[in-house]
Image: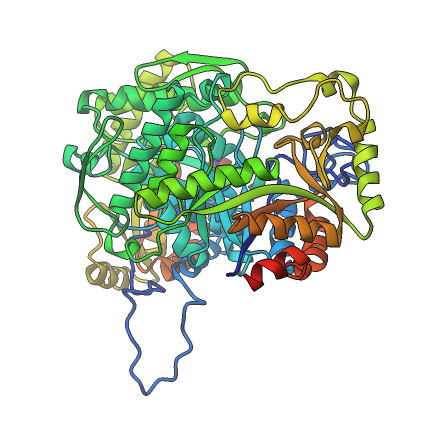
């Protein structure tokens, strides 16, 4: 089984790094030449570069209302960092599905098809109103499905016509050469049964929240069952916080310092790789890893955990 | 008073010459020897360059040649302005990205956040060309079924919200098209300069929204007296509302060392246009601007000079490439004089273009812009 490993960039995290308004000021005794020539995007580019150089297949860019827009970050990083896939997360409330698809195509054409689309989980009602999104909670799933249907539709066919409750297109569809680009791989997430049903119909990759092996295994089986009914393949992924060090006690100490969440995998490089191989064994093929600080931890995971994980999986494959 | 000069990024491929009509830069025509970005590789496929690499060259030429930045147009067959700007911001230094955008296509709060991010990424180099017209089948292609005047109402509300949330705080809005509650950009995003708004549209509904929200009112080139009249109306309308409206012109140039060489480009280009294409009119749009341009071009023109509407003004550009009909053709000095005249009749800014966009950015920047303000009309105006 081939594993895709993504590193997560949270634009709202670590504001002390290159964030002009939040950075720590140097005392006067330190001669400084930091100025407007440097900005927050230098940090995003550096984390992206770290992910590429440390062997990740992609950078997963979180949707954060309080920080920079993920698709703007993705483009800025893509132009500078070769090789990796960029997976910006954004909500289905961004606006026109046709326009979103058109932007995706332009990104694909400019980066040799290195874009993924992660649709963010819907927010609560008050947050949605803050974002100018006034549709009812009961309509969110339907809107998500129409958004993806229209975005894929205008990319796949011409003329494309669709009359939905949230989106309508008449005689649409992209012409050559725009229709030659690949449509981005679509990542959906969620644990509810409804989420899984939408994923069975619309996701290329479904991302689960990290949890115990048995829970992950059960959810994979549920989605597998739904997928058999729709007859389209869905890959399974995990949003997995991780803290790995040469020794488990060192990992534990760092996890306490950064306040790693309960579902984090914390341990020695070998221990963490072994747990990940177990997860791969129950069907997880896409891992979105995260830790803080995101630059340094990308190197630790990329240099020490990913090679161990890949070695374990290839041994398993040989044994099988 | 200093005038803003922008260039234009061709987002639908480019031609290496105005004389031929096949795109040979980008992948809008079949890949052939001599094509650029992508070019043919030795294995018969495409080389490693994409059209964005050519756009990058044009943006760098424009900033090097003295332009403030460039307009990035958006149509069904083009690359997307938001993506281009985000891709190229870090490899350019001063180039300002003027994004053509139809407000209905994005949630205004999300768009404000993306625009603020673009400002942070580029050091405040984003601005917008707000477009509302078009209409007809083309709007339905985009998934937009609002009527012409409704679209202007929506544009106004969209800009109300976009502006309302920009500086942070808590903003409520209860419009016909948009509602928000307790909205505002987060503190890290709320310190960016509000992007300039360049506004297009020739209808009454457009002029009314422009008066309220536009920093620049942008028009295609029209016969000079007609344009002077339009600018007067726009400026007067805004003055009545207590504001001041700047005006700008989007125009193509064919500038050459001599007038004869310039007309030769146009003549050869015209003669390479098929009879059928010469008779084609703009169809399927409710755009008032497009209709005004079409009226400039007699369908029975058989010679390029049938389309000369005034000294150095040629009405057949939309036969040679997409876009407006009227453009300026002449020697470097004549081009500078016509631009001086346009400044005298009220232009505060320009979006210039020429084909091929890369080489012509350097040519116009090096040969025409340095001559501005020195012709008789400019000196006369300065003396007044």
Q: Which residue appears farthest toward the front when viewing the image? A: B384
Q: Is residue A178 visible?
A: yes
The structure residue drawn at horizontal position 46% and vertical position 41%, both measured from the top left corner, is B232
For the residue pair B209 and A73, the one nearer the viewer reads as: B209
A7 in relation to B100, above or below: below
Q: Is residue B170 left or right of residue B306?
A: left
Q: Quadrant of residue B140?
A: top left
Q: Which residue appears farthest toward the bottom when viewing the image? A: A29
Q: Position of residue B313 (x, y in %)?
A: 70, 38
A23 in relation to A94, above or below: below
Q: Quadrant of residue A299?
A: bottom left
Q: Is residue B267 left or right of residue A265?
A: right
Q: Is residue A214 left or right of residue A42?
A: left
Q: Position of residue A173 (x, y in %)?
A: 52, 20
Q: Quadrant of the C terminus of chain B?
A: bottom right
Q: Position of residue A214 (x, y in %)?
A: 24, 33
The structure residue drawn at horizontal position 23% and vertical position 26%, both measured from the top left corner, is B176
């Amino acid at each position: 089984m081939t594993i895709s490993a993504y590193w997560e960039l949270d634009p709202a995290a670590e504001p002390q790094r290159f964030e002009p308004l939040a950075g720590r000021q140097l005392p006067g005794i330190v001669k400084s030449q930091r100025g407007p020539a440097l900005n927050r995007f230098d940090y995003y580019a550096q984390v992206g570069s770290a992910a590429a150089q440390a062997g990740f297949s992609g950078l997963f860019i979180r949707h954060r209302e309080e920080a920079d827009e993920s698709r703007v970050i993705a483009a800025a990083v893509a132009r500078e960092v070769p090789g990796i896939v960029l997976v910006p997360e954004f909500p289905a409330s961004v606006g026109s599905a046709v326009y979103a698809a058109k932007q995706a195509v332009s990104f694909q054409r400019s980066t040799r098809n290195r874009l993924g689309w992660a649709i963010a989980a819907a927010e609560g009602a008050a947050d949605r109103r803050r974002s100018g999104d006034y549709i009812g909670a009961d309509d969110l799933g339907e809107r998500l499905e129409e958004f993806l249907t229209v975005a894929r539709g205008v990319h796949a066919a011409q003329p494309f016509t669709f009359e939905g409750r949230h989106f309508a297109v008449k005689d649409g569809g992209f012409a050559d050469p725009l229709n030659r680009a690949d449509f981005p791989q679509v990542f959906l997430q969620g644990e509810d049964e409804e989420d899984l049903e939408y994923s069975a119909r619309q996701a290329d990759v479904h991302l689960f929240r990290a949890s115990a092996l048995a829970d992950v295994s059960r959810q994979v089986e549920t989605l597998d069952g739904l997928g058999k009914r729709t007859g389209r393949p869905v890959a399974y992924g995990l949003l997995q916080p991780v803290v790995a060090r040469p020794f488990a006690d060192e990992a534990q100490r760092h996890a306490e310092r950064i306040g790693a969440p309960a579902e984090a995998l914390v341990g020695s490089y070998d221990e963490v790789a072994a747990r990940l191989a177990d997860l791969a064994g129950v069907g997880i093929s896409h891992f979105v890893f995260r830790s803080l600080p995101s630059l340094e931890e990308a190197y630790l995971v990329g240099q020490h955990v990913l090679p161990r994980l890949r070695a374990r999986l290839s041994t398993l494959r040989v044994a099988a | 008073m200093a005038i803003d000069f922008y260039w234009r990024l061709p987002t639908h491929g480019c031609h290496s010459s105005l004389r031929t009509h096949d795109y040979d830069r980008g992948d809008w025509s079949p890949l052939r020897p001599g094509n650029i970005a992508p070019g043919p590789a030795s294995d018969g496929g495409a080389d490693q360059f994409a059209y964005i690499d050519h756009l990058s060259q044009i943006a760098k030429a424009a900033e090097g040649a003295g332009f403030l930045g460039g307009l990035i147009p958006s149509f069904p067959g083009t690359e997307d302005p938001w993506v281009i700007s985000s891709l190229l911001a870090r490899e350019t230094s001063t180039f300002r990205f003027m994004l053509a955008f139809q407000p209905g296509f994005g949630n205004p709060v999300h768009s404000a956040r993306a625009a603020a991010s673009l400002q942070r990424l580029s050091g405040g180099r984003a601005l917008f060309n707000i477009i509302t017209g078009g209409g007809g089948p083309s709007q339905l292609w985009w998934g937009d079924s609002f009527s012409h005047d409704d679209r202007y109402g929506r544009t106004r509300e969209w800009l109300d919200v976009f502006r309302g949330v920009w500086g942070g705080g808590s903003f409520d809005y209860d419009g016909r098209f948009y509602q928000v509650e307790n909205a505002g950009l987060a503190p890290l995003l709320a310190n960016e300069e509000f992007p300039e708004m360049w506004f297009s549209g020739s209808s009454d509904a457009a002029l009314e929204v422009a008066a309220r929200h536009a920093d620049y009112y942008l028009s295609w080139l029209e016969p000079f007296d007609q344009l002077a009249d339009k600018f007067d109306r726009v400026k007067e309308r805004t003055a009545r509302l207590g504001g001041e409206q700047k005006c700008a012109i989007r125009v193509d140039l064919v500038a050459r060392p001599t007038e004869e060489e310039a007309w030769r480009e146009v003549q050869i280009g015209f003669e390479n246009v098929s009879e059928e294409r010469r008779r084609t009119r703009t169809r399927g749009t409710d755009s008032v601007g497009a209709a005004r341009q079409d009226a400039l071009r007699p369908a029975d023109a058989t010679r390029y000079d049938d389309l000369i509407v005034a000294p150095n003004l040629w009405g057949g550009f939309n036969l040679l490439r997409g876009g407006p009909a009227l453009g300026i053709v002449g020697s470097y000095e004549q081009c500078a004089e016509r631009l001086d005249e346009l400044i005298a009749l009220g232009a505060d800014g320009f979006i210039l273009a020429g084909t091929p966009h890369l080489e012509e950015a350097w040519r116009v920047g090096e040969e025409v812009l340095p001559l501005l303000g020195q012709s008789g009309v400019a000196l006369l105006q300065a003396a007044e």
